[in-house]
Image: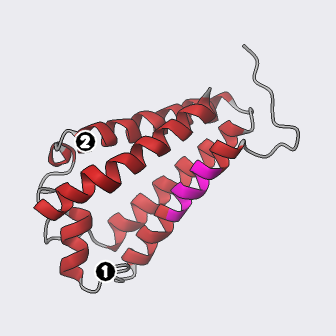
Amino acid sequence: MTRRATATGRPSTSAGATSLALVAVGVVHLVWATGSTFPFRTRAALNDAVIGRQVAPGPAECCAVAALLGVAAGAVARAGTGHGRSSRVMATGVAVVLATRSAFGFAGRTALLVPGSESPRFMRMDRWIYSPTCAVLAAGAAAAAC
């Protein structure tokens, strides 16, 4: 099966939206790498809601996640143009990772992927915000890969 690029060479709407969302999440991780607690008032609130434990990843870890999200965004955007087998393979990988994260979150088992992510607030937000977001992003990445 041969893929066709969009007429403009730009990513499809779903690939573009997915890429933009991945970049936005990456930017938030970069903001956290600077020590910001955005959008929470305190480090404890951020840790409880986003990480599920009181020990936060350091700047290097936040930057690594941001870099991976940037690579994922690029792969999804490129795959969405219809070019590049490697980009489609990478976008498929992005979809698998995000779908796995979503499934573990919906099952209340994120701690199996990220040990210690077990606070009640995190688990509630994981089921209602993080897992559905990961599922939507996984669908967008999968659509770009097809």
Question: Sequence order check: which comes first, mark 1 or mark 2?
Answer: 1
Q: Residue at x 60, y 31 (%)?
A: 145
Quarter placement of the N terminus: top right
* Position of residue 96 measured from the top left corner of the image (x, y, whole percent): 42, 33
Query: In the picture shown, does residue 131 fall above or below 47?
Result: above
Q: Residue at x 34, y 73 (%)?
A: 59
* Position of residue 57 measured from the top left corner of the image (x, y, whole percent): 25, 68
In magenta stretch: residue 72: no
Quarter placement of the C terminus: top right
Count residues near mark 2 (Cα–Cα under 10 Å), then give few for <14, some for 14-19, many for 20+: some
- Residue range in magenta is 17-24
Residue furthest out toward the right: 7
At label 1, the amino acid type is Phe
At label 2, the amino acid type is Phe
Q: Separation of disc 1 and disc 2 at Cα?
A: 24 Å
Q: Is residue 128 left or right of residue 7?
A: left
Q: Quadrant of residue 119?
A: bottom left
Q: Residue at x 47, y 39 (%)?
A: 138
Q: Which residue is mark 1?
A: 40
Residue furthest out toward the bottom: 41
Q: Which residue is mark 2?
A: 106
Q: Is residue 35 left or right of residue 19?
A: left
Query: In the picture shown, does residue 75 fall above or below 20?
Result: above
